[in-house]
Amino acid sequence: MGWINIYAAVYNEDHPGLLDFSQRYGKQFLWIIASIILAIFIAIIDNRFYFFFAWFIYGFCMLLLILVVIFGKEINGAKSWFEFGSISLQPSELAKFGTALALASYLNNRRQDLTRLSVIGPAFAIILFPAMLTMLQPDTGSAIVFFSLFIVLFREGMSPYIFVSGLLMILLFFLTLLSNILYLSIALIIVAAILVWFTTKKWKLAIAGTLLFAVIAGIIYLFDHYVIKSIGNEMVVFISLILSGALYSIYIYNKRAASVLIIFLFLLGSIIFVNSFNYAFNNVLPQHQKDRINILLGFKTDPHGTGYNVNQSIISVGSGGFGGKGFLQGTQTKFKFVPKQSSDFIFCTVGEEWGFMGSFVVIGIYLSLLLRLIFLAERQRSDFARIYGYSVVSILFTHIFLNIGMAIGLVPVIGIPLPFLSYGGSSLWGFTILVFIFLRLDASRTEYLI
């Protein structure tokens, strides 16, 4: 399906042959053949190879991520590729299965005791290290995919509080972009006071903390307004929260209200996250990525500039209607209105030429694949194979969700391929290795694996 849609996306009337190797569809055919050979090779290797060499593979992938930042070819402002003549290789695509193997090996040895900080800390490091190296390229899309492996940690016993904290961070991410930082900080303090009231059933405790904060904030605000005149309202709130929290903690200790202390730490962490993200968004994030996020949230319209890709992509998908315009009949596709339509925006071709029904079939196939992989993961007898299986599911799901969401304007344009459909040898090889290692482990599930 990917090969046929790549053919439609970059169709050239002067080169109509599917096996014309001067065109992308001809090159993709070679990548498909190479992937089939690679899949067979993976299938005949002893399954214990992936267990015993997991850390070696991870280390080799990390070395490639480091080297690509130094020696890689810069394309569109990112050093994400090694170039060998006419062949390019993207190490971040290979690092995904390497990270999944290392995470499975580590958790298998530790017997998934993710309630202990000494276990969960290194697990976080295994995931974050390749994500940070990928960000140095910079390749935000691939870096986000590594974070999907936190889903695996939750499945293997990580505290739900950490998982909920992650969801709250995502919520705060959007609230930070949508609202004033000062008002958001005050709202978080009010929410914390209400939570103290509900958890302790003592309204006096919540009011005491709120009044203490209000008094200290008032004093610092007046001092700044009339004397210093340089702190700023957001910093006044932050300093007041720390000082009032220090005094309030003495009161909490005497009342033995540990839950209140947890709420305060969450509040403090939320305020730090909001201010840090606000600073990073305005001062660190590249302008084109800020523009994409602002366009997605409706703060900015730029249909002929930064928002051109998404705007044309939505038109392309929507113009397909229920049944589509037909194979090679897509006007948006034929006249090249959507950039990168054979790679990042391959779903546009599906939507325009095959319509709602074709899109439904493609998404249905992906959903069936994910459900089948979850079933296979659950039936594994070894922890290593199960953890790796869920890593495969997490990575594939993230790619599918973000790529299709990107094509229909639900998520910012971050440039990641649609598994097995997008053009590109690195991504096709990466997904092939990722899936077929798990199929090899599943085929040997009855054998003894440490």
Image (cartoon, rainbow, N blue to C red):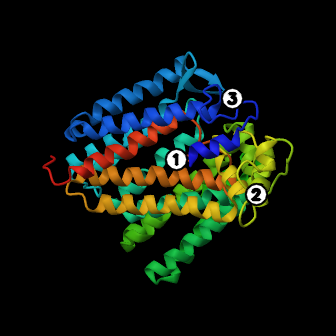
Residue 53 is marked as: none
- Image point (40%, 50%), residue name: 392
The residue carrying mark 3 is 76
Residue 419 is marked as: 1
Q: Decide which of tag 1 and tag 3 comes sooner along the chain.
A: 3
Q: Is residue 269 above or below residue 35?
A: below
Q: Is residue 226 above or below residue 374?
A: above
| Quarter of image, res 433 | top left
Q: Nearer the viewer, residue 183 or 322?
A: 322
Left or right side of 202 for 194: right
- Image point (63%, 60%), residue name: 359
- Residue 226 in view here: no
Q: Residue 216, position in %: x, y?
A: 63, 61
- Residue 322 in view here: yes
Secondary structure, mark 3, is: loop
The residue carrying mark 2 is 325
Left or right side of 90 for 114: left
Q: Decide which of tag 1 and tag 2 comes sooner along the chain.
A: 2
Q: Decide which of tag 2 and tag 3 comes sooner along the chain.
A: 3
CA separation in Å, label 1 and label 3: 22 Å
In the image, what residue type sits under mark 1? Pro
Q: Nearer the viewer, residue 447 or 291?
A: 447
In the image, what residue type sits under mark 2? Lys
